[in-house]
Amino acid sequence: MKHYLTAEWGKAMARPYYRIYLSVMVALAALLALTWWWTGREGMFQGTFGVCLGLLVPFLSMGLYLAVMVADVVFSEQHKLGTLKNEVSYGLPRARIYLGKLLTAAGAGLLLAFLTLLVYAVLCRLLIPAGPRDGAAIQTFLFYLLSDIPLWLGALSLTMAVMFNIAHTIPAMAAVLVPLMGLGPFFRAIMRLGPEWLSAGAGVLYRLTLTAPLDLADVALWDPAYLLWCWGVGLLWTLGSTAAGLALFARRDIR
């Protein structure tokens, strides 16, 4: 497994797709930090370093959808290119192939997120003055970041499960984006319009969607119930998608 992970990591880091993706994300982070600096210099923005971190919090939820791109970087149309079939024909265990690519995608995504956030935070700290309430703002940012990581991993695991088992791009993207974008609004609609027993069931299912924790506008800092909810939902989707995806892949005829 160690050699397989090393090989997959090397391939992912060497792909122009990943380098371009990383460069774009880092450039956007730098541009956003420079925007706060420039508007501050012009008198249009009077925020501190902590305020700048707080302004980034709404963007953290985008990790659910950027996870789709990270998974694509690692999987890289292996059905179309025939590389997945070659690995299976070579005799590599399917569990090693599946888990190796999933772990590589998780590592590549976390590296991308770390570098992007690091560039933004460093530039904001260098360009924007500090404030007396920055400590609380930093804690808030870290709290939401810690809350979003398991949800992002759940979205990544779902995407990898779909890519391993659906060869065509359009059906695969539909199978990923419908649960991510559609399940939450669907269950919320049933909660509002359905009879009481159906609304109650929809409410339970809604709380298990990856986007449900992100819909809350006001959460107490370091609320253990909220953290447990985020990590419970994220792990449910991560473990559930991985188990289902691996089980289907183990029985699939690779062509």
Image (tube, rainbow, N blue to C red):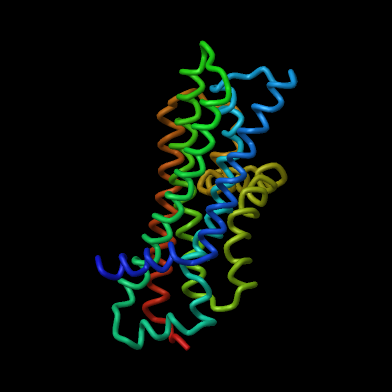
The residue depicted at 44 percent of the width and 66 percent of the height is 14
Residue 179 locus on image (x, y percent)? 59, 57
Residue 38 locus on image (x, y percent)? 69, 27
Q: Residue furthest top?
A: 132
The residue depicted at 45 percent of the width and 30 percent of the height is 143
Q: Is residue 236 left or right of residue 29?
A: left
Nearest the eye: 183 or 114: 114
Residue 141 locus on image (x, y percent)? 50, 29
Residue 64 locus on image (x, y percent)? 55, 50
Q: In which image quadrant can residue 41 be found? A: top right
The residue depicted at 54 percent of the width and 14 percent of the height is 131
Q: Is residue 238 left or right of residue 163?
A: left
In the image, residue 181 sits, relative to residue 147, either above or below, namely below
In the image, residue 17 sits, relative to residue 42, either above or below, namely below
The residue depicted at 30 percent of the width and 71 percent of the height is 96
In the image, residue 169 sits, relative to residue 20, either above or below, namely below
Quadrant, the N terminus: bottom left
Q: Is residue 49 left or right of residue 157?
A: right
Nearest the eye: 8 or 90: 8
Q: In which image quadrant can residue 33 be found? A: top right
Q: Residue furthest left?
A: 2
Q: Is residue 103 left or right of residue 116?
A: left
Q: How many marks?
A: 0
